[in-house]
Image (tube, coloured by chain):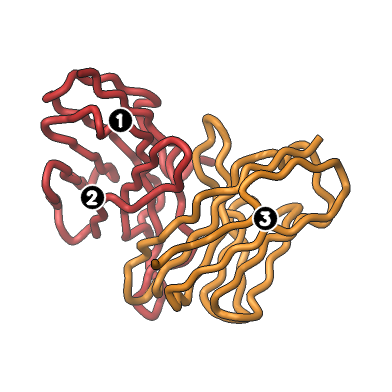
């Protein structure tokens, strides 16, 4: 059972365009939703994250939109650049009773983004 | 430099020969974790540790062992490797799941091939 579903698997965008990657989750106990960026030959690195008490979070050209009722969240990359070409992973984790996030981070299968110059 | 280091970076071994992949972090992080990355399957968590002497299974723990005897190190042990454990392995750490909200810092990866 795949707890976090990510789409599309691959995405090609022209420079300056908007890249949109979508994720859906099933477990309503999830309450922390990060996006990780991975370049070839490197480990993933945290890009941006959101908690379900807000519907949107923006950091520079990167925005997470969150729809709690639909159990969906998405990453928007504005003015996409060739340097954004990488694999993007959404993820989710659950809150523990003492207020932290549980250690079991569930990842989507990833989206390979190519930004053409 | 704050970092997570893994050794070896590349390893080719044969079925059944015990091996250990080391992971070390110099950030005094409480939380550490191991993942495997396979094409089309994304990242799957193998084991994680909330603190010294505290470990728990992730989604795919079968065939793996871990230990957390000291805060900075979290080795991954394959007692009897099999070809289906051929994969790219990542170690990660986080300051504290309680304080950092789960932001994890990943190592550079270890590519393991079991023949």
* Image coords of residue A87 (percent x, y): 38, 35
Q: Alpha-carbon neighbours of circle 1 within 10 Å: few (<14), some, or many (≥20)?
A: many
Question: Which residue is under mark 3?
Answer: B61
Provide the secondary structure element on which disc 1 rests: loop
Alpha carbon distance from label 1 to label 3 = 32 Å
| Residue at point 42%, 68% (across, down) | B94
In the image: residue A71, left or right of residue B96: left
**Above or below, A50 relative to A107:** below
| Residue at point 60%, 78% (across, down) | B54
Instruction: Indicate the chain on which mark 3 is placed.
Output: B
Question: Which residue is under mark 1?
Answer: A85
* Image coords of residue B100 (percent x, y): 32, 70
Q: Quadrant of residue B58?
A: bottom right
Q: Which shade is chain B?
A: orange
Look at the image and tell me in which quarter the N terminus of chain B lies.
Answer: bottom left
Alpha carbon distance from label 2 to label 3 = 31 Å
- Mark carried by residue B18: none
């Amino acid at each position: 059972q795949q707890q976090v579903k990510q789409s599309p698997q691959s995405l090609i965008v022209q420079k300056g365009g908007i890249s949109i990657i979508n994720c859906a989750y099933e477990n309503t106990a999830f309450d922390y939703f990060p996006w990780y960026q991975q370049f070839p030959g490197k480990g993933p690195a945290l890009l941006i994250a959101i908690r379900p008490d807000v519907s949107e979070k923006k950091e520079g050209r990167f925005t997470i939109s969150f729809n709690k009722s639909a159990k969906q969240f998405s990453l928007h990359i504005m003015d996409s650049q060739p340097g954004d070409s990488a694999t993007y992973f959404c993820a989710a984790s659950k809150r523990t009773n003492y207020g932290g996030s549980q250690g079991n981070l569930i990842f989507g299968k990833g989206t390979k983004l190519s930004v053409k110059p | 430099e704050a970092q997570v280091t893994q050794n070896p970076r590349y390893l080719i071994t044969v079925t059944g020969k015990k091996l250990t992949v080391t992971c070390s972090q110099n950030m005094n992080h409480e939380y550490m974790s191991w993942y495997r990355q396979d094409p089309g399957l994304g990242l799957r968590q193998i084991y994680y540790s909330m603190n010294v002497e505290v470990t728990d299974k992730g989604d795919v723990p079968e065939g793996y062992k871990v230990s957390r005897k000291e805060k900075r190190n979290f080795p991954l042990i394959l007692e009897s490797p099999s070809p289906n454990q051929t994969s790219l392995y990542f170690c990660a750490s986080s300051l504290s799941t309680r304080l950092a909200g789960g932001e994890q810092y990943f190592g550079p990866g270890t590519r393991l091939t079991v023949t």
